[in-house]
Amino acid sequence: MDWVTAARELAATFALRAPEHDRAGSFPFENFADLRAAGFFGLTVPERFGGAEVPLATYLAVLEALARGDGSTALAFMMHLKTFGQERDAPSYPPEWLGQMARGALEHGYLVNTVATEEGLGSPAGGGLPETVAIPSGDGWLLDGRKTFATLAPVLHYFIVLARVPVLEGETPRVSNFMVLRTDPGVRIEETWDSLGMRATGSHDVVFDGVRLSPERLLNGRALGAGDARGGAGMAWFALGICAVTLGVATAARDYAVTYARERTPNSNRTIKDYPGVRTRIARMDLLIQRSRALMDDACRAWEAGSSEGMPVLNRVAVAKIEALNSCIEAVDLAMRVVGGVSLQKSRPIERYYRDVRAPLHNPPLEDRALEMLARSALDEPIEPAGPAE
């Protein structure tokens, strides 16, 4: 199946629905029904379970295509798709749960996402201790807490919940991931999502009020500050997915500005595409988008090849995420200047692109942490001695 072509066809329909969902902040249930009907729920699911198991590069191309129609749908769907991609590259959950999630996606249309963020915690990547707690109870666990930014909340079936667990006094705090199902008593969605951009991702709060979990719901655990079992796979599939979504939104803005420049004819009877300032801005947009895509593709190839040549792979991922985000924001800003004052009108999609392209500023890796990662590699790690002269 040509997944990218199919994604482009769906994106054209999603683009027609996007204005209404953006204005209302409503979840695009119909988009996800279309994605399921077209087989996309199994896009990254391993072949052994009946999924398509597409490579990272195809996953990125699909996300970019979807985001050109609706950034919110692409960003939300990414959270489901990356879960299986990460697990393929770096298994971290019990095999029986991976199989259950895979079969649930393929046979029942169940979606999955990790819910880890809390208002007081911020991004879990910062190493903070969650307030959500799982306490041993009988032979299982009792879960209490609240999570924010639970993208896909209106349709999630599998919630992978990060919680702290009790330790003895003086021991290093520990965190664990637990599997919570939508049908578990005590799970409640509070519709809190009312954002500037990506308004239709359904990233509401989820409340866990005395949720009783059997022993097998414990997926994994680690000491606070220890490396995540997903390792670099988590960063590659998440950060590069963010790149792809951002590129899709920026490309949609670029295409809108180009069409506008070709058609807009003020009183002079010349289309504005002939104005030097417009031509410069359009060219700059293409430069920024192409450079970002090249960096994303470079990081993708390096990850898939396990490359050890040149810059470390995860540093390339960090570079791609930072550059794609900042460059795509600049590209959309330029598109707004080409279109002019009417670009502020909510009746035009470019106003939505302007807001949506900024949302990934708050998705990890955050810029300061990514830059520190690059600085640490350059300044703090041992320098390899020079090889012998040829």
Image (cartoon, rainbow, N blue to C red):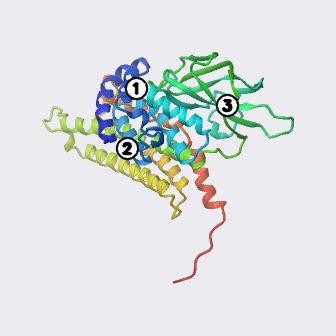
Asked if disc 3 and disc 2 are in contact, CB closer than 8 Å, the reply is no
The amino acid sitting under disc 3 is Glu
Q: CA distance from mark 2 to mark 1?
A: 18 Å
Q: CA distance from mark 3 to mark 1?
A: 30 Å
Asked if disc 3 and disc 1 are in contact, CB closer than 8 Å, the reply is no
- How many neighbours does mark 2 have within 10 angstroms: few (below 14), some (14-19), or many (20 or more)? many
Name which of mark 3 and mark 1 comes first in the sequence: 1
Disc 2 is placed on an element classified as helix
Asked if 80 appears above or below 273 in the picture, the reply is: above
Asked if 216 appears above or below 297 in the picture, the reply is: above
Q: Quadrant of the N terminus?
A: top left
Q: Position of residue 147 (x, y in %)?
A: 62, 25
Q: Position of residue 226 (x, y in %)?
A: 70, 45
Asked if disc 2 and disc 1 are in contact, CB closer than 8 Å, the reply is no
The amino acid sitting under disc 2 is Ala
For the point 72% across and 34% down, which residue is it?
A: 129
Name the side, left or right, on which 145 lies relative to 354.
right
For the point 49% across and 29% down, which residue is it?
A: 104
Question: Is residue 228 visible in this depiction of the protein?
Answer: yes
Name which of mark 2 and mark 1 comes first in the sequence: 1
Would you name the residue on which mark 2 appears?
61
Would you name the residue on which mark 3 appears?
216
Q: Which mark is residue 32?
A: 1
Q: Which mark is residue 153?
A: none
| Snapshot quadrant of residue 136 | top right
Q: CA distance from mark 3 to mark 2?
A: 36 Å
